[in-house]
Image (cartoon, rainbow, N blue to C red):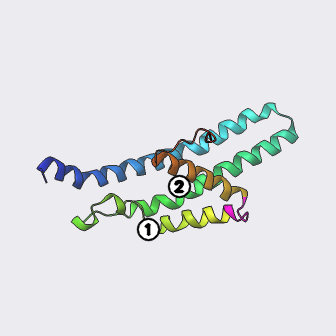
Amino acid sequence: LPEAVASFVETAPKVLLRGILDAIDGLLDTLPSAVAIFKERLKAFSSGQQLVAQSLVDQAAEPVLKILENLRPLLAQVDFTSPADSSFANVIPAEAFLVVPALMQKVKNGKASANEMFAAAVIKDILDTLQGQKADGPKKTE
């Protein structure tokens, strides 16, 4: 391989990992504040509406925070010390790939909680985006 390509192949996973960790850190810092701001805006609602809306906000935010809090230490442990480890496939722990199909199956079977359904929806949208599929709306049929 040309030296520039070899250098890119060697450094890209490390840069990608650092970017992912920074994004997770940013979300972990920002999401609780955003939830608090949103809840503050709910004070214009009646007390009954506030109760329901705040519960929905918590149900939406909690699974995302939990996933990020659990994923962060796993990604922080990734170490590209040998050339065999220096690949994009080693950025995400293998265990993470087992959780996604199990969660999707649980949703399909109708046995998922509201939090799990929300997490599955977020994961599905991310996967669709990474695979280049439109997540904007229903697919048109002819």
Between 7 and 38, the residue placed more toward the observer is 7
Name the one closer to the observer, 120 or 46.
120
Q: Does the magenta stretch include residue 112?
A: yes
Q: Is mark 2 on a helix, strand or loop?
A: helix
Q: Where is residue 116 in the image (x, y as percent from the top left)?
A: 66, 59
The x and y percentages for residue 13 are: 31, 54
Q: Where is 33 relative to 102, above or below?
A: above
Residue 68: mark: 2
Which residue is labeled 1 in the image? 94
Q: Which residue is drawn at 53% across and 41% down?
A: 134
The earlier-in-sequence mark between 1 and 2 is 2
Write the start and end of the magenta stretch as one range. Answer: 108-113
Q: Which of marks 1 and 2 is in front?
A: 1
The residue sitting at 12% across, 50% down in the picture is: 2
Residue 35 placement: quadrant: top right
Quarter of the C terminus within the rendering: top right
